[in-house]
């Protein structure tokens, strides 16, 4: 029989059953392997002594209490995984629908937002803290009328800023500074515009309102039949990383295989996304901003605190509210390129968004980066 | 899906991810900290490394990733070795601090304390000098990982772990005796 290999001898030091009968027999009769086993044991003993923290006066255990304390610290650092989960829909929607604006167009939150957009020149973005309960309380747009989307956004990858600018009919700003850990290779895409109308209907609202509340929640007469038309322009998306963000607003073909972008969470998002788009055109017939706002915020279930927050915004025709999940993010007013914007950061400081409007273009910079880096990138856009 | 529903679903998903991450943390933290301690010989520094490793993992991967354990173990080795390399400059200061602390507390033997710090530092520096794979196998094995766990983390067969361990222990002994400071 050949000599035992080093690995077998070393395992035998830890486990008496590591050798089979033949190997044991060989070891007993072979002085070479016996000597090698002794040397192996000596080296192992030396390493075991040297690498034992207790032998050098250091502790070598982690008690359940210490694990609990460590968990508290780590949990405090990672917070809730906003940058991986909660921002996903927000960022993806922003990218897909030409900045965060379009999120509001197609959603229940949009029901509220649209009420501010009759004269749509959002010069400011204001954070509206929302809880999970608040979000659940928001009325669904389709309870009050009919939504018709004549064109939904589609995304097309392009070769670079020049082609993107040509398709979007705007000058595309690019960042002149990036953090070292962000891939410097950019991919460009242009989303098509969209055109959506919403027509208020007293009959639909009545059918969706509990009988006992119908008189109190009756739709104002001048709101019945009023139409909001929201037209978004092509938006340019610049993604740094391996892939473009998913286009959430695009309808998925019935029966088609699931795209990897929708439910995989924001891990499918690139580490940095820059979106820029002209402000949408929003027109309204027959209803004022105040009437729409008042009507929607009176709906049953709408949280009084949320309604108060929205009513306190003050200048709704130039201010866009952006919902911020209070459990995991914060919003703060920031100055970007000399204008007022809104910074949204997660509670652990590892992800964020900054949104601002300048010269008729809405810009959004979002990424899994510290807020200071996101601000620096935003400032470097030229 | 409506935006509110999507956010709600995302929050539910986040809750699930949170609990999965906590389970992962509670099942692996002791091992990750032990690996770091085998390299750093400093409980506080090892805790810092272990926690950094979990934070990094959380940022990069889903908690139920099938490679979670091996990723954490390997990252603990690399992070701790990096910390050792960055710590060389601080060694003299640590030794001086230890002596000063001991003298101030007037308990124990200051010389013994300094010797202990020097020994820990020497062992850590030896691990920093040998082949990183050897350092990894030593730290993992002596932190209590099984042959199978070490094999999984290093991407080798369990049979090969014995061979690596043998070579690593020989290299460690030779290097430490050659230059124990």
Image (cartoon, rainbow, N blue to C red):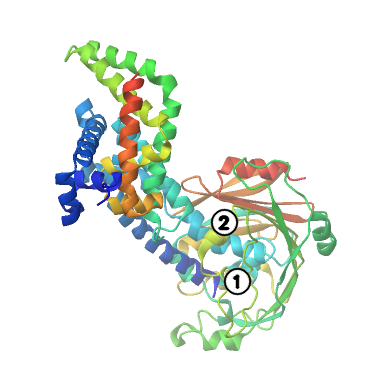
Q: Are marks 2 and 1 on the same chain?
A: yes
Residue at image x 75%, y 70%? A193
Residue B13, visible in the rendered structure: yes
The crowd level at tag 2 (other Cα within 10 Å; few <14, some 14-19, many 20+) is: few
Which residue is rendered at x = 65% and y = 60% of the image?
Answer: A316
Q: Nearer the viewer, residue B25 or A309?
A: B25
Label 1 chain ID: A
Task: Give the structural element (helix, strand or loop) at label 1.
Answer: helix
Q: Position of residue A244 (x, y in %)?
A: 65, 61
Where in the figure is residue A256, as x and y percent of width and height?
A: 59, 82
Mark 1 packing: few (<14 Cα in 10 Å), some, or many (20+)?
many
Which mark is drawn over residue A312? 2
A256 relative to A344, above or below? below
- Compared across the picture, whether A168 is left or right of A12 comes to right
Q: Which residue is mark 1?
A: A111
The residues tagged by marks 2 and 1 sit, at their Cα atoms, a distance apart of 17 Å
Q: Secondary structure at mark 2?
A: loop
Q: Chain of mark 2?
A: A
Query: In which quadrant of the rendered image does the C terminus of chain A lie?
Result: top right
Q: Is B44 left or right of A293, judged from the image as shown?
A: left
Can residue B139 be seen here? The reply is: no
Say which residue appears at 31% left-offset and 33% top-offset: B170
Seen from the viewer's position, the closer of residues A188 and A141 is A188
Quadrant in the rendering for residue A294:
bottom right
Residue A121 on image: x %, y %? 74, 59
Of the image marks 2 and 1, the number of the one nearer the N terminus? 1
């Amino acid at each position: 029989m050949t000599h035992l290999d080093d690995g077998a001898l070393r395992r035998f030091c830890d486990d008496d059953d590591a050798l089979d009968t033949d190997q044991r027999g060989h070891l007993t009769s072979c002085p070479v392997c016996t000597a090698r086993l002794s040397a192996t044991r000596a080296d192992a003993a030396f390493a075991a002594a040297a690498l034992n923290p207790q032998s050098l006066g250091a502790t070598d255990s982690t008690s359940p209490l210490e694990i609990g304390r460590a968990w508290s610290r780590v949990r405090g650092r990672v917070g809730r995984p906003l940058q991986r989960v909660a921002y996903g829909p927000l960022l993806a929607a922003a990218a897909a629908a030409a900045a965060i604006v379009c999120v509001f167009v197609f959603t229940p939150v949009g029901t509220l937002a649209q009420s501010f957009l009759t004269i749509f020149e959002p010069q400011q973005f204001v954070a509206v803290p929302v809880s999970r309960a608040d979000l659940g309380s928001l009325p669904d747009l389709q309870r009050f009328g009919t939504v018709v989307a004549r064109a939904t956004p589609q995304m097309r990858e392009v070769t670079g800023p020049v082609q993107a600018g040509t398709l979007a009919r705007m000058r595309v700003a690019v960042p002149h500074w990036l953090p070292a850990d962000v891939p410097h290779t950019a991919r460009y895409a242009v989303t098509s515009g969209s055109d959506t109308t919403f027509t208020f209907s007293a009959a639909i609202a009545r059918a969706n309102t509990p009988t006992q509340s119908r008189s109190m929640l009756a739709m104002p007469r001048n709101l019945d039949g009023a139409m909001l038309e929201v037209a978004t322009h092509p938006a340019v998306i610049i993604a740094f990383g391996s892939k473009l963000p998913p286009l959430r607003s695009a309808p998925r073909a019935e029966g088609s295989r699931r795209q990897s972008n929708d439910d995989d969470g924001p891990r499918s998002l690139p580490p940095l996304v820059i979106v820029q788009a002209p402000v949408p055109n929003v027109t309204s017939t027959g209803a004022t901003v105040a009437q729409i706002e008042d009507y929607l915020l009176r709906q049953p279930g709408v949280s009084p605190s949320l309604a108060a927050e929205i009513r306190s915004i003050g200048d709704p025709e130039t201010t866009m509210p952006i919902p911020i999940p209070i459990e995991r993010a914060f919003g703060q007013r920031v100055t970007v390129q000399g204008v007022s914007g809104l910074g949204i950061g997660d509670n652990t400081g590892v992800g964020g968004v900054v949104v601002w409007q300048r010269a008729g273009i809405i810009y959004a910079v979002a990424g899994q980066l510290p807020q200071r880096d996101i601000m620096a990138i935003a400032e470097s856009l030229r | 899906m409506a935006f509110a529903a999507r956010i709600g679903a995302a929050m539910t998903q986040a809750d699930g991810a949170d609990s999965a991450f906590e389970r992962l943390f509670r099942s692996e933290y002791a091992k990750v900290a032990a690996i770091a301690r085998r390299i750093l010989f400093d409980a506080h520094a090892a805790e810092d490394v272990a926690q950094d490793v979990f934070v990094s993992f959380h940022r990069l991967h889903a908690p139920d990733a099938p490679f979670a354990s091996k990723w954490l173990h390997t990252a603990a080795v690399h992070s701790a070795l990096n910390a050792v390399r960055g710590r060389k400059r601080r060694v003299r200061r640590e030794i001086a601090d230890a002596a000063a602390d001991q003298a101030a507390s007037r308990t124990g033997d200051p010389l013994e304390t300094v010797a202990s710090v020097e020994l820990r530092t020497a062992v850590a520096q030896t691990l920093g000098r040998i082949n990183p794979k050897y350092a990894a196998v030593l730290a993992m094995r002596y932190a209590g990982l099984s042959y199978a766990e070490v094999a999984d983390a290093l991407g080798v067969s369990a049979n090969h772990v014995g061979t690596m361990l043998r070579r690593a222990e020989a290299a460690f002994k030779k290097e430490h005796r050659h230059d124990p400071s």
